Image (spheres, rainbow, N blue to C red):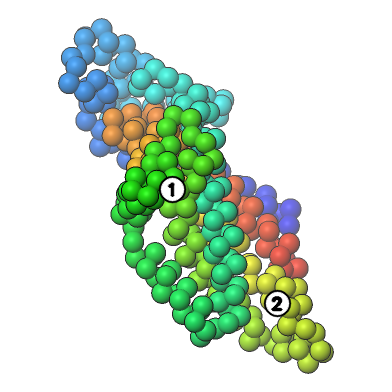
Amino acid sequence: MFRYILRRLLQMVLAFFGTTLIVYALMFAGQGDPIQALAGERPVTAAQRAYLTEKYHLDATGVGGFFYRYFDYVKSLLQGDLGQSLTGRQIGDILQAAWPVTLKLALIALAVAIIFGVSAGVVAGIRRASIFDNSTLVLTLLVLGIPTIVLAPLAQYFLGVKWQLFPPTAGSQPTFYALLLPGIVLGSLSLATALRLTRTSVAENLRADYVRTARSKGLVKRRIVTVHVLRNSLIPVVTFLGVELGNLMSGAIITEGVFNIPGVGFNLFRGIRTEDGPLVVGIVSVLVVVYLVSNLVVDVLYAVLDPRIRYE
């Protein structure tokens, strides 16, 4: 297990630098005039342009200039400095304020997927071809067919504006109740996927040989499901949910934008819209770390859920 974790850590380092290099290239290669994009229609003085150009090494052109700026960014990144955005704010301070909000939103969405998705998936897997099973399959298919960009405004209008069950917007300092509706919207796709995945896994394990053996020994159905079937069925579900946590934190751009939530996704979208290269690359670099760590934790949990799994 130690050798496997060490090998995965080395792979994580390569994946991190490769991903940040690609994102850095995509962000700065297609960039027009980031200084003017930041200022909008306001004029930029020659002194301001010269200062920003020198500060962010925008005068270095060509392939050599690109790698010079990238390695300078990596050097600061390894020292724990995410740099400054084009607005002059420290990216670390921006993330420090935005990260707790997005983390709360992602945890609410993940809790919705686990509580309702996994529980309903277990019941649907046990009662295959029942009314509950068929109903959940239809509902999850409907949810999967509606993109978040459509689902979020609909939920905001009906549940927030028309029926006033939830606050329509979260505000600058959102409470748990204000984040509940966007969390449900964000976790709806995860809930549907987790439900269908759990249902399929439980149904397959119920037909396995070890279940037939347990029944022949006289074990009650509840013990077979809770002790044997559920533990083996959770392996693909844990894999999905572990990776989905990273997806939820980075994929909250639409949800945070619709509900006016000042989180990571909201700041990432603002950085893309204003062509704020340092802000975009800094946020993406942190999100890449979240993805890699989530994948590593999920892989290690394999051995906890199923002792038969060993890494050489």
**Which residue is nearer to you in this view: 9 or 306?**
306
Classify residue 77 as left or right of residue 9.
Answer: left
Expressed as whole percent of the image width and height from the top left, the position of residue 285 reads: 47, 37
The residue singled out by tag 2 in the image is 225
| Whole-number angstrom distance, CA of label 1 to CA of label 2 | 37 Å
The residue singled out by tag 1 in the image is 165
Does 264 sit above or below residue 50? below
Expressed as whole percent of the image width and height from the top left, the position of residue 23 reads: 38, 40
Expressed as whole percent of the image width and height from the top left, the position of residue 236 reads: 58, 67
Residue 217 falls in image quadrant: bottom right
The kind of residue on which mark 1 rests is Leu
**Which residue is nearer to you in this view: 31 or 290?**
290
Classify residue 196 as left or right of residue 155.
Answer: right
> Residue at 71% of width from left, 54% of height from top?
3
- Tally the marks: 2
What is the crowding at mark 1: few (fewer than 14 residues within 10 Å), some, or many (at least 20)?
Answer: few
Look at the image and tell me in which quarter the N terminus lies: bottom right
The kind of residue on which mark 2 rests is Val
> Residue at 55% of width from left, 76% of height from top?
124
Circles 1, 2 touching at the beta carbon (< 8 Å): no
For the question of whether residue 303 can be seen, the reply is yes
Earlier sequence position, callout 1 versus callout 2? 1
Secondary structure of the residue carrying tag 2 is helix
Does 79 sit above or below residue 246? above
